[in-house]
Each structure stands twice: as C-alpha cells, then as structure tokens.
Amino acid sequence: MKILVAEDDQLMLKMLEFRLKKDGHEVIVTHDGRQAVAKLDEFQPDLVITDIMMPYLSGLEVVGAVKRKYPHGTPVIILSGMGQENVVLEAFQLGADDYITKPFSPNELSVRVRRFDVSAVK
Amino acid sequence: MSWQTFILHIFTYGILLYSIIMMICYVLIGAFSVGETRSYLNKNSFTDYRVLASSTEAPSMSILAPAYNEAPSIVENVRSLLSLHYNNLEVIVINDGSKDDSLERLINAYDLYKVDFFVNHQLKTKPVRGVYKSRNPVYRKLVVADKENGGKADALNVGVNIATHDYFVCIDADCILEQDALLKLAKPFLENSTQRVIAAGGVVRIANGCEIEDGRLVKVNLPKQFLPRVQTIEYIRAFLLTRMAWTRLNGLLLISGAFGAFEREIVIKCGGYNSNIVGEDMELVVRMRRYMEESNEPYRVSFIPDPLCWTEAPATFKILGRQRNRWTRGTIETLRLHKKMFFNPRYGLLGMLSYPYWLFFEFLAPIVEFVGTVGLVIYCIAGSVNWAALLIMVGVISIGILYSIFAILMEVLTYNQYKQRKDILRLVLVAILEPIIFHPFVVWSAIRGNFDLLRKHNGWGEMTRQGFAGEKKL
Amino acid sequence: MMTDGNLQMFFTAKLLTSNAILPAGYVIRVHYQVIVMFFIACLMSITLLYMLIYLYFKSKHEKKHDKWRLISDLIIRKAIFSDEDDEIETETIIPVIDRAKKLMRNKHFRNLLTEEIMSAKKSISGTSADNLKHLYQQLSLEKYALKNLRSRYWHIKAKAIQELTVMEMNEFVTELYTYTNNQNELVRMEAQTAIVQFHGFEGLRFLDIITYPISDWQQIKLLQQLSHVPPANINIDAWLESANNSVVVFALKLARNYHRFELHDNILSCLDHQYPEIRLQAINCLCEIYTNETSDHLISRFLNENIKNQLTMVRAFQNIGSEKDIRFLSSLLASDNDEMRVCAARALAYSGKNGLASLEDHARVAGYPLNEMILQIKGELAA
C-alpha cells in the first residue's frame, strides 16, 4: 500500500517511516501540511496519515483537501496529541476515517493501517 | 565669572549629568534584563506548550487583524493566521474601507456570506457595513468585518466590539507569526494568581532578508541592506534589553502595536484605542495601567522574549523618517494626555519611574542630543573648541556602542537567530556605524516630529490614506 | 601618540575661553575621562572576545551535535522495535553500540539522548514505550536525574522531576510527593504533575495539604493529564470547602468535567462564596450539572452578582433555562447593557418552543437594537 505520512516531529517521522516500511508499505514522508497536499497528485497514496499541529497547513486542512480531491477513496488516519472531544469530533466531521491519539502504540497503528489495505483483505 | 562662561558651564555640566544618569540607566537595564531573561528561560525551557493548543480550558483569544488595501497578500495572510496552533480562537479580519478588492478576494477564497450581526457599540467607531462568516466548517474560526475607513485605531476598536473572547491579540496584517505564537503569548495570563495580567507583549523581529513563503517564515537571515540591519540591532536592544528590564520592575509602558495581547474587559472599560492620536498602541497600555492603578487592583503587564512576530522594516530613509516622526508625535501625545501621573506617588512605580523615564530618556533624549551637538558646533565655529564636551560626546557614543554589543551578546546567548558567525560580526560592525550614520537621522526625524506637532501639522488625514504598513511602533 | 602629561597640558591650555577657573579641576577630569574611555574600550573588547569564543565553541559543538543526534536516533529506534526484530522477552538488553557507550560519559551527549528518549516516550505507548523505559534504566540515566533532583537550583530540580515522571520511574514517588507543596512554584508544579501521572485521580490527594495557589496553567495541565487516565470516583466535596481558593476552583472544574451530579448542592453553596472567581466557576459548573431548580437558585442570586458573573449566568441559561425562566429572561431584554440583552435573547431562543415564540413576539414590536440582535440569533440557529 502507498502511504503518505505528514508529521513535523523529525524523530517521530523516522519512526513511522521505519515501522510502516517494515510492514511492507511504500512510504513517502512530508514535514508539513502543505508539502503533504502538494505530494497528493504526484504520489496518489492509498492512505494518508497526518498529525494535526503542523506548520503551514493543519492536519484538519489536509483531511479537507484529501476528501475534496478523492470524495470516495483515500482514507485518512489522524495521529495527534490532541485527544479532546471537540477536536476528535471536528476531525470526523471533516471526513477523517480513523483517529489515533498520542501517545500511541506502533503495533496498534500497524493493525489499524492494515484495516484500510484493500489488497490484503482477501 | 562672565555670563558666557556661566552658561557654558551649565551647558557642559548639565549634559554631563544627563549622560551619567543615562549611563546608569543603561547599566541597570542591562542588569534587570539579564535577571528577567534568565528566570524566563529557566522557567520555560521545558514547558510543553502543546497542552494549551487543544485544551478547552485555555483562555479564549481573538486575533484582530486590521487590513487596508492589502489585496495582494490578504488571502495568504489570513490562511497563515488560521493555521496558528490554538483551538480556542477566532480570527477577526477588519477591512478598513479598502479601495481595492480585498473583501471580494476574502469572500471568494473562504466562501464567506454576510450574516445578520448586531454590533455592540461598546466603543464608538465608524459604521460597520457588514460581518461575514464562512460556510465551510474548516474556516469556522474566521470572521470578517467590513467597515468604513477610519484608521488603524478605529479598525481595532471595531474588532474589540465584535470579538467575543476574553482576550484579544492585535497584529498588523503584514506581520508573520510563528505557529506557536499564541500558545506562548497566552501563558502569562494563566500564571499569576495574585496579580491580574491585563496585557502581554511579544517581541517583534525584522523580516527583511528572511525567506518567506505563503505568509510563513521559512528561514531567518540577516537583512542585506544597511537600514534594516541597523534596525535589527535597534529592535534587539529595545525588546531583549529595555522591555525585559521594565517587565522585571512591572513598569512596562509599551506593547508593540504589531503584536500584543490584551484583556478585552479592561480595554472596553477604559475606552479602547484612541483614534485621535498617532501612537494609539502606547497610549492604550498607559491608559490601561492608569485605570488599574486608579481602581487599586493588583495587576501586571507581561512580556515574553521569544521571537514570535516578524515584520518588514522600512528600507528607505524617507519611510523611516516618517515612521520615527510619527513615533515621536505618539510619545509626546501620550505623555501629554497622562501628564497627571508625572511624579505622582498615587500611581506608584508608574508615576514615579516609568513615566519620568519616558519623559526624560525617550522624549527628551533626541532634543538634548540635538541641542548638545548644535551647541558644540557653534562653539567650535566661534573658535573655542570645547575639548571636554567633545570628549564627553565620544564617551557617550562609545558607551552606546558597548550597550549595542551587549545586546548582541544577549541575543547570541538566548535565541541566536542569526546562526553564522559572519552575521554576528556584521551586526557588531553595524553597531559601530550606527551612531555615525543612522542615529543622527533618527534624532533629526524626532526633532521634526516635535516641530510638526508644535505646528499642529498632524498626520491624521494622511494616516487613513496611507494605510498602516511600515508605521508600527517599535 | 600623546602621553598622559601631554594630553593634560593640551587640555589645560585649550580649555574654555576664560582663563583659569578650576584649572586643577579640569586636569582631574581629563584624567578621569581618559581612564573612563580606556575602561569602555576594554569592556567592549572583552564582550566581543567573549562572544567570538562562545560562538566558536558553539559551532564546533553543533557539528558534533548532529552526529550525536543520528546515534541517539538509532539507539532509540532499535529500542522501540527491539522485541519485533528478534521475538525475544522484553527483559533482554537493548543493543547499544560501543561508541555510544563511550559517549555516555559525556554530559552533553547524555542530555541529548535523554531528551530524545523523553520526546519519543511522550508520543509512544504500549510495548514500545516499555522498551524505551528499559533503555533508560539500562543506561542508568535515572541516576543522573536523581542527582539533578538534589540540585539547589530550582529549575534543574524541576526538570529532573519532569524527567522521572515522563519515564515513569514510580519508585521515587514518595520523595516527589514531599515536593508538592514546595515553595518554588515550578518544583511543586512538576511534583504535582508527577503524582497525578503515577496515581491518577488518587494522586490528587495533595490537594488536601497544599497551601500555595494552583495557577490556571497548572490546572489546565492537571486536567489534561487526568483526561488520559480512567475516571475514578474520588471525593471532591472536601476540596469544595478548602481554604485554598484555587483548590475550590479546581474542584469545581473537576466536578463539571466529570459530571458529578451528586455534588449539585455543594456547588450551590459555592454560589455564596465571597471570592468572585469561585462563584463564576460555580456558575460554569452548574451549566453542566443542573436540576429543575438550578435556574431558580441562580435567579435569586442574580441581582447581587457583579456584571461579569451576571453575564455568565445568563449564558448558562442557554443550557439550563426552561419555560419557567422565560419571564426572567424577557425582563433582561430591557436591560441597558447590550451584551446582557444579546445573551438574554439567545438564552430565550434556546428555552424551548415558547421561548422562541416570545422572542419572536418581542421582535415584532421591538425597534433597534433588539430587532438586530434577534435577527443575529435566528441566523445562528439556522447555521
């Protein structure tokens, strides 16, 4: 599966890339929301994983952009330190498909990602 | 003793005394600033500001961004304001009767529609033509107010009337904020449980030469041109030394109009921005402090030294001169409006120290310098070179340079925005050149400001025509 | 170059038009000035030199820093994914390269590694987080934290407490507890955070003893931290009567966030507290925890409140108002405070069908500004 990751924390980003690649996914990493949106067309990801608090464009805007571009495809998982009800609700209202709060378990992330893998469900 | 000698003595010794007091002030400011900066850094070096970003308990803030004829950049600027890390936020853009298509661009970019809105005229302003909100839930934080042209203070007052949150942050539409700016600016309001924090100021840095993309600061560079570069030192001195020192004493009188947070309730109670004067940002803080002193409530005006707001500084002598001219007029008008506080023990530190300092060392300094220099020149021409006075002057200038170098050192030790060693050396070089090339011009502009005010040559009309870019108070 | 003596003669000769007033005085002053100038020049060069040396070491250090960062990233990544690589017990030793082991003696590297481990620990949970904890202990980093805990500088002490908290070093909790009422604000804040981290709601028992105020900032932090642990039914009522005002405010926030309906009457009594901020919080709290009679209690205290709390009450009626409050709210529409009128109108609109109907009645007869306010509120309802 092709996964686009947007996360501004360098260490976190490396961890995510390492883990997802190990799970056999093709991963492209971006450091902020704007980069992520810009890479959408070129990379055509099957899944987007995004943080909320990022430079330039927030993760919520990334969700909006993805959903506008692919109204029926490309699920988005939000991976954020903000676990407050109002933020989570807003994310889902905007069309996010899953919401993981930090601190998160990489194992859990890996399983949640697999749920969106259409090719794996056979 | 002949009367000429007598006058000469008064003149020489007067200036000597003035210089000595000023030097003592420099030393004290340096010392207080070091103390305040150190305790701020110790306290906040391991603070996790992200706690505030999403908390529903975080103080509610409104950003007030007045805009006049900023169509080319307004959409991007608003976008960068909307992406600031803060959940409990509303962004209020006030279109101050722009003659270009600012409003149309905003309406198209953010899918705005005109809402029925009752504007509570707690502060008197020019009429509001309409209030707009977005249909798109992503932009739920955005409010746009369209009003008739009335200048910056009037636009800000409209913003204060429309705002619904407890605190508001005023910014210039052309300023670039760091993403965590509001988190850091909000914290002082939450920290003190014995004094009411009525306002908090932030540092303004110079954006000339920096790499900027889509309303975001990408890379910090030292300005390439001379004028902005000198102003870089000026700003470091003013913010990192002077403001920090005054904050330690709780005597801060000025929060930059380009970036500061205020408690809305107090601002409304003391009447909002004064739209009849040019230095509305300084005047507001003075009036708020005065109000708090008069109502005998313990309060505090806070200041944070983190570089959070970046702005374009004037790069030509013409614009710079106009800016300094305005600052001078603003200072004088503010001092005049509040002269009651001068050495008035009722106002505590504000009356006994802050106000006199502003009077003697902000308002009078250029005049003393001007008179001193002109006097010296006259005596030299008259054939009697006053070597003692000349030496005093050289001494004062060198101490000024030393003070600038100390400011650069503080910057290097704290935030160190200019990473290359070459840049630091360039800054030092500029600090040495400043008193020769830059400073006389600033003094001259200040003197002209004095004359303009005396001749009632005020620029109120001119202000609304020019908009407010490049006119912000340091 | 002139010597000092030359200079003096020079000055005494040239000084002023009139001859010989205080010539001696001037001589002394010239001397003095030369010394002062020399002194300034010295200071300037010292500052400059200091700055250059500092910058030199800093840039040298930074280059090393980048290398160290790569090393510590590698160590951390290995730690996080260690159990998956080899499918072995979690108790096994996490591989750390020899070079890093040598570097561990360097204080700066240690600090960097500790910071990186902490930052990773903050955003990761589950087995990977346990691995990070193991790594931390394996490298005996907690020993250094303990040493810092004993520091006489408060910010180092506070930082050490934070480190032990993030790394979940539960064994030091008793020592940390003693710091919860420390005279230094930062130290007690971190200690309180630590206790809540280790014991969840039970940890809040420090509220029984603290005499210093809890700042709003600290309250936000504590609430945030509590939101990560499962709610427990602890006794809040004693705190609602605490002599420490900030404890009462915090208890009210807890009661509201966790919907403690059984405390309704205790909260009502806070409405009569002499400290206005507590009354304000009590109103906010009743906004979430209310019964049929709550609005009557608010109305009976309305006139004696300050304007800020009155407005908060009227806003609360948006939630708790019902048909029986329509008369009260309608009467406020005649207030001379516009903000009060807007709030009252909005509360009416939310007070059932009849509330909206009565608002529409008002709209029909009212002129400016009430008609505009009502239009705005209708717009809000439609949006």
Image (cartoon, coloured by chain):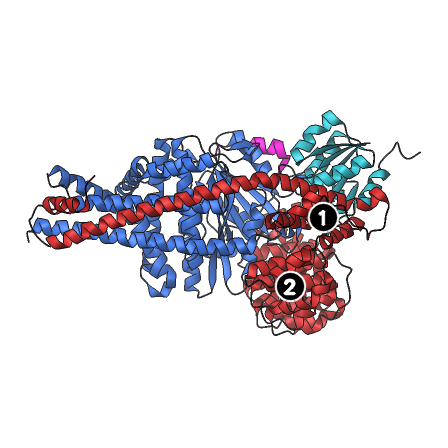
Chain colours: A cyan, B blue, C red
Specify whether residue C368 is in view: no
Quarter of image, res C182:
bottom right
In the image, B315 versus C270, the foreground residue is B315
Highlighted range, magenta: B98-115
The tag on residue B282 is none
Q: CA separation, marks 2 and 1?
A: 21 Å
Say which amino acid is labelled 1: Ser
In the image, C29 versus B58, the foreground residue is C29
As drawn, the residue found furthest toward the top would be A42
Q: Residues within 10 Å of mark 1 (few under 14, many from 20)?
A: some
The tag on residue C191 is 2
Q: What x and y, as percent, mark residue A17?
A: 75, 37
Q: Residues within 10 Å of mark 2 (few under 14, many from 20)?
A: many
Q: Chain of mark 2?
A: C
The tag on residue C123 is 1
Q: Where is the N terminus of chain B found, in terms of image quarters?
A: bottom left
